[in-house]
Image: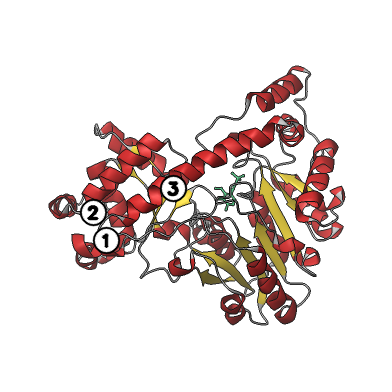
């Protein structure tokens, strides 16, 4: 009898959460590490939001609450989403969750049978692929192209749609690329979906970075496109816009009440409810006029850092870097570095049991960490399927500008440090 169920092995993970232990190992060796691995704003939650939660706690708001979300938050959300997406939203279609992550699993569990096809962006948030394989659906990665700024066209999507397509996941602004789909992109994507898909196909629109946009661009939701509200699950949350990652507060807007009830029942089965005082904080975040300025300041910082990082990467021999228009990541292509450091040869010579655990970009990621003190994420942490010949790293720019300057300086040195890389491989201590 096996200890773990067969399905346990089918669940992927989010390596950003696992890297902490490896960074701690590097730090214990005395390495000073500049961290570009974390996907969370380097700002604290605004005080007025913390105060609202503290006051609520002091009043004894420490009990279970409604499983789908407290009424004041559902009402505020319905109003805000109706305004920003220009579609009428009823509070009964909204389900509050512990962050924007649970609606991913809820959607895979609610809509998808084994053998159904799920289209999702790659590189993309790793949890999409993780849950697709977990429910025995067929993963259909939509490979985003660097030369298109990691946007995709309706034609590219159309080629992947089949009669078995059940769920189409899109994420704009995107983690890990910072790519943003314009209103026109979304409208032509919606046309293809309306023309080619059954009415029971759902579009999962992950809009968690909706407020983090650069160069004056505005957020668009596919739910606002013609005939799409009835097919789209809008998902967003408070983690990124209000620097509230630890509060675990997000939500899904479902096309029908029936689907909202299914999500609420998953809440009941898994979490019971989202902490009521976090939800009170969420109401404050939306209602308090100071939020606008807080978001503006954060976005200005992220934009300033992007403006430094992208040209600095493009000036490094062996690296090209697309210009992200949203979120707080850059996603440089390191294929040239892999060539100049001999990473491909080193990878091909690894024993079979090591090869399955790593990739050229992961070798570079570990070399950067243990030899140059820079923590990044590798390409395969954002969807593995079909990504064998793609060589990128992700850096979060949710780090102060001085650290970004220093960190990119270290990456420049690493990109030319062939002797160091040979030494790293010869030691074979951190090949994971
Ligand atoms: C694209 C995307 N979706 C969802 C999430 C999950 O957000 P939360 O922390 O609110 O659960 C993240 C977090 O990194 C993300 O990048």
Residue underneath mark 3: 307
Exactly how many numbered labels are in the figure?
Answer: 3
Give me the residue at 72% from left, 56% from top.
Answer: 234
Do the CB atoms of the residues marked 2 and 1 lie less than 8 Å apart?
Answer: yes
Q: Position of residue 153 (x, y in %)?
A: 58, 73
Q: Under tag 2, what secondary structure? A: helix
Q: CA distance from mark 2 to mark 3?
A: 21 Å
Q: CA distance from mark 2 to mark 1?
A: 7 Å
- Neighbor class of circle 2 (other Cα within 10 Å; few <14, some 14-19, many 20+) is many
- Neighbor class of circle 1 (other Cα within 10 Å; few <14, some 14-19, many 20+) is some
Q: Going from the N terminus, do you reach mark 1 or mark 3 first?
A: 3
Q: Going from the N terminus, do you reach mark 2 or mark 3 first?
A: 3
Residue underneath mark 1: 318
Q: Is residue 397 visible?
A: no
Q: Position of residue 361 (x, y in %)?
A: 32, 59
- Neighbor class of circle 3 (other Cα within 10 Å; few <14, some 14-19, many 20+) is some
Above or below — where is 275 with respect to 148?
above
Q: Quadrant of residue 197?
A: bottom right
Q: Position of residue 80 (x, y in %)?
A: 78, 45
Return the mark for residue 415: 2
Judged by depth in the image, the label closer to the viewer, 1 or 3, is 3
Q: Going from the N terminus, do you reach mark 2 or mark 1 first?
A: 1
Judged by depth in the image, the label closer to the viewer, 2 or 3, is 3
């Amino acid at each position: 009898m096996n200890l773990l169920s067969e399905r346990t092995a089918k669940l992927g993970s989010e390596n950003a959460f696992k890297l902490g232990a490896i960074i701690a190992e590097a730090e214990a060796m005395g390495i000073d590490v500049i961290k570009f691995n974390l996907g969370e704003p380097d700002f604290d939650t605004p005080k007025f939001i913390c105060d609202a939660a503290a006051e609520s706690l002091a009043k004894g708001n420490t009990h279970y609450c409604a499983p789908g979300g407290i009424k004041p938050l559902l009402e505020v959300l319905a109003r805000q989403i109706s305004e920003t997406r220009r579609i009428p939203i009823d509070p009964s279609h909204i389900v509050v969750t512990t962050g924007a992550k649970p609606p991913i699993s809820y959607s895979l569990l609610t809509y998808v049978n084994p053998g159904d096809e799920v289209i999702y962006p790659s590189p993309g948030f790793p949890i999409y692929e993780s849950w697709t394989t977990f429910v025995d659906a067929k993963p259909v990665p939509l490979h985003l192209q660097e030369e298109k700024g990691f946007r995709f066209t309706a034609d590219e999507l159309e080629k992947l749609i089949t009669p078995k397509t059940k769920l189409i996941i899109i994420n704009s602004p995107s983690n890990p690329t910072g790519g943003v789909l314009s209103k026109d992109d979304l409208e032509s994507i919606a046309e293809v979906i309306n023309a080619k898909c059954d009415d029971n196909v759902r579009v999962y629109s992950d809009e968690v970075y909706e407020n983090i946009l650069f160069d004056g661009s505005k957020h668009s939701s596919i739910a606002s496109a013609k005939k799409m509200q009835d097919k789209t699950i809008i998902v967003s949350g408070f983690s990124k816009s209000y620097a509230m990652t630890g509060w675990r507060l997000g939500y899904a807007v479902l096309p029908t009440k029936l689907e909202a009830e299914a999500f609420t029942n998953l809440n009941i089965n898994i979490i019971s409810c989202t902490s009521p005082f976090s939800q009170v904080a969420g109401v404050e975040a939306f209602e308090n006029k100071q939020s606008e300025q807080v978001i503006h300041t954060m976005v200005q910082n992220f934009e300033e850092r992007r403006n430094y990082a992208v040209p600095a990467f493009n000036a490094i021999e062996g690296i090209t870097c697309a210009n992200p228009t949203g979120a707080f990541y850059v996603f440089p292509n390191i294929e040239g570095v892999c060539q100049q450091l001999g990473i491909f040869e080193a990878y091909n010579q690894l024993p079979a049991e090591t090869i399955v655990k790593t990739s050229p970009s992961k070798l570079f990621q570990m070399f950067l960490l243990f030899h140059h003190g820079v923590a990044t994420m590798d390409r395969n942490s954002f969807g593995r399927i079909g990504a064998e010949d793609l060589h990128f790293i992700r850096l979060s720019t949710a780090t102060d500008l001085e650290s970004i300057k220093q960190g990119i300086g270290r990456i420049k040195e690493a990109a030319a440090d062939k002797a160091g890389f040979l030494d790293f491989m010869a030691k074979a201590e951190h090949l994971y």
